[in-house]
Image (tube, coloured by chain):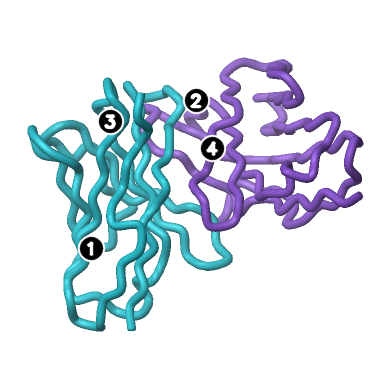
Chain colours: A cyan, B purple
Amino acid sequence: NAGVMQNPRHLVRRRGQEARLRCSPMKGHSHVYWYRQLPEEGLKFMVYLQKENIIDESGMPKERFSAEFPKEGPSILRIQQVVRGDSAAYFCASSPGPRYEQYFGPGTRLTVT
Amino acid sequence: GQNIDQPTEMTATEGAIVQINCTYQTSGFNGLFWYQQHAGEAPTFLSYNVLDGLEEKGRFSSFLSRSKGYSYLLLKELQMKDSASYLCAYITGGGNKLTFGTGTQLKVEL
C-alpha cells in the first residue's frame, strides 16, 4: 500500500512565477490536508479538502494561494506570483476520514530565488 | 498566539528513558497526536490519545489528561536513531485540522 505521494520533492521558482505542488493520498483515503513548515517553525495548517470540495481553508493566505482536489487526479496546491517568504516545506497529509490519524507525504521544498 | 507548548530541546543518554511534555489550551478538544520528524523528512505518526490515560506501543507510550490540558510522550530504551523532533498536535471540533506545537528536538547521546 503506497503512502502519500508528493511531487516534486524540490521546486525552485523565481519571484513572480507560479508554483504547483501535487499530492496523491494513500489508497482508500478521501481526505487531504495541506500544511506549511517554515524554517525553525512548527507545521501550520493551510487547507482541508475532500474530493471536489474545500472543507476548511482557514489557514490559507487570502491572496495568491489556492487548492483543489478534483474527482480524478491528485490534489494541487497552487501559489501564484511567488515571493521569497513562500520558501518553505509544504506537506500533504491524508486520512480515511476526520478524527483519524493523518499520514504525511515526504513534502515539497519550495525555494523562491 | 501559541496555545500548545512543549520544550524546545532535550538531551538523553542511549538506553535511558525520556519524557517529553506537552500542554495545550483549546475548546472543542477531540484528541492529541504525537509525531516524530527527522530533519528534512515527513512527520511520522506515533500515537493518538482521545481518552485520558496511558497508551503503550512498544518502546513508546503516550499519556493524556484532558482536565489538565496535558500530555506526555515516553520513550524507553533510547536508541541513537530516536534523535529527532517530536511534535505534539491537538485536533478540535470536526476533527479536520491539526494544531501543532513547535516540536521538541531530542538528542540521544552515547
Residue A57 drawn at (x, y percent): 26, 47
Which mark is nearer the camera, 1 or 3? 3
Q: Is residue B6 above or below residue B98?
A: below
Q: Secondary structure at mark 4?
A: strand
* SS category of the residue bearing label 3: strand
Residue B12 at x, y = what percent? Answer: 88, 47
- Give A40 or B109, whichever is nearer the viewer: B109
The relative height of residue A77 versus residue A29 in the rendered view (above or below) is: below
As rendered, which of B110 and B60 lies closer to the eye?
B110
From the image, tell me which residue sits under label 3: A31
Residue type highlighted by circle 4: Thr
At label 3, the amino acid type is His
Question: Circle 2 — which element?
Answer: strand
Q: Which mark is residue B36?
A: none
Mark 3: few/some/many CA within 10 Å (<14, 14-19, 20+): many
Q: Is residue A24 visible?
A: yes
Nearest to N terminus: mark 1 or mark 3: 3
- Report, in whole angstroms, how far the alpha carbon at label 1 lies from the one at label 2: 27 Å
Q: Nearer the viewer, residue B88 or B60?
A: B60
Chain hosting mark 1: A
Give me the disc on residue B44: 4
